[in-house]
Amino acid sequence: MKKRILTGITTTGTPHIGNYIGAIRPALEMAKDSSESFFFLADYHSIIKNNNSEDIKNSVKNIALAWLACGLNPNKTIFYKQSDVPEILELTWILNCVTAKGLMNRAHAYKAAISLNKEDPDKGINMGLFSYPVLMSADILMFDSTHVPVGSDQIQHLEMTRDIAQRFNHLYKPILTIPEPMIQDSENTVPGLDGRKMSKSYNNVIPLLGSEKELRKSVMKIITNSLEPGEPKDINDCTVFALYEYFASEGQIDDLKKSYKDGISWGDAKEILFKLINEELNPIRAKFEELKNNNDYLNDVLHEGAKKARVLAQEKILAIKEIIGISKIN
Ligand code: TRP
């Protein structure tokens, strides 16, 4: 069977370097080989936790821009907004009807949310959050995805998707493709300015689409130890070095290792890091600048992507509905 990779990006916030290293860059790398690729903006997922329409709109735009600026080729990858493929919501309902409530009770995201509540465990929990994994399953199963690149926090959702698909196939006919997860961050997470995982919620991110000046300012804010220039430095547990490794060649890494031994100052090490990240981001920034005021182009790209996706989705949902008995009277 043909390899078909599919991944969704929840449209909250603006992308940072951690998203770039952990998700965008590897996914685009995968899309380059001969497999088919589907990348989409999970805007229906984003309204589960955010009801600020301006936030959602801005995020959809910035995330679409980020992927295109980073080199997504919309002629090769089917790139669309989840909400432009309404068949996904039809499938969501159908899958809801074969999903055990008990399975959803075990979802980490839901469990984490109820564990914060004291008297009433259901306080602030909407049905969207509870059935989040079903929507995600529909995203994946709609297109017979075979491989799903995700962060390790999504492993459980992939397991649930496989469970739900297997149950459907068992109850009806084996029509749903069982997907394989491709875990993108199993060994290490990208550190942020304070050394913890780079994350918007820790307020420690380096923005992907900022200006050169902003990039420099962020890099200079990276927390280091207080060793003086001339004192040898350890490459382990060092955020500057860890980030450098994501952008540098083997030779460059060896050179910086040597400089650490020789007691490079933190200022100089950060300058080297800044230059290297900036080199990689320069063309991305240029493309971003070119596209950012061209909403017509963005809308066209997403519209074309949705058109291609819908052809497949419509065919699939028809077959699924036929199997469950929602079809013409005959
Ligand atoms: N839940 C994923 C995340 O937050 C985003 C997502 C939605 C997704 N639907 C998907 C990822 C389908 C892979 C496949 O990261």
Image: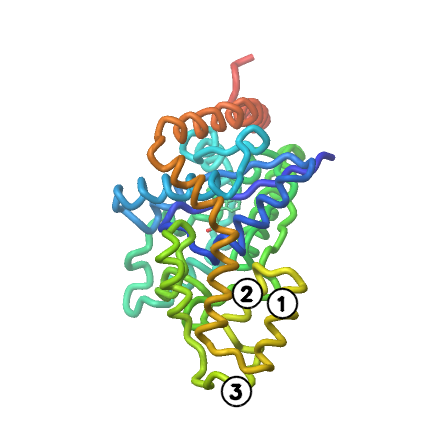
Which of the two labelled residues, at mark 3 and mark 2, occupies the earlier sequence position? 3
Gap between marks 1 and 2, in whole Å?
8 Å
| Residue denoted by label 1 | 253
Rendered residue at 45%/39% (across/down): 287
- Numbered disc 2: secondary structure: helix
Circles 1 and 2: CB atoms closer than 8 Å: yes
- Mark sitting on residue 151: none
Which of the two labelled residues, at mark 1 and mark 2, occupies the earlier sequence position? 2
Q: Closest to the observer: 1 or 27?
A: 27
Q: Quadrant of residue 318?
A: top right
Q: Report the amino acid beneath label 3.
A: Glu
Q: Locate residue 173, reporting x and y percent.
A: 65, 32
Rendered residue at 33%/34% (across/down): 293
**Label 2 beta carbon within 8 A of ligand 1:** no
In this picture, residue 170 sits left or right of residue 87: right
| Residue denoted by label 2 | 244
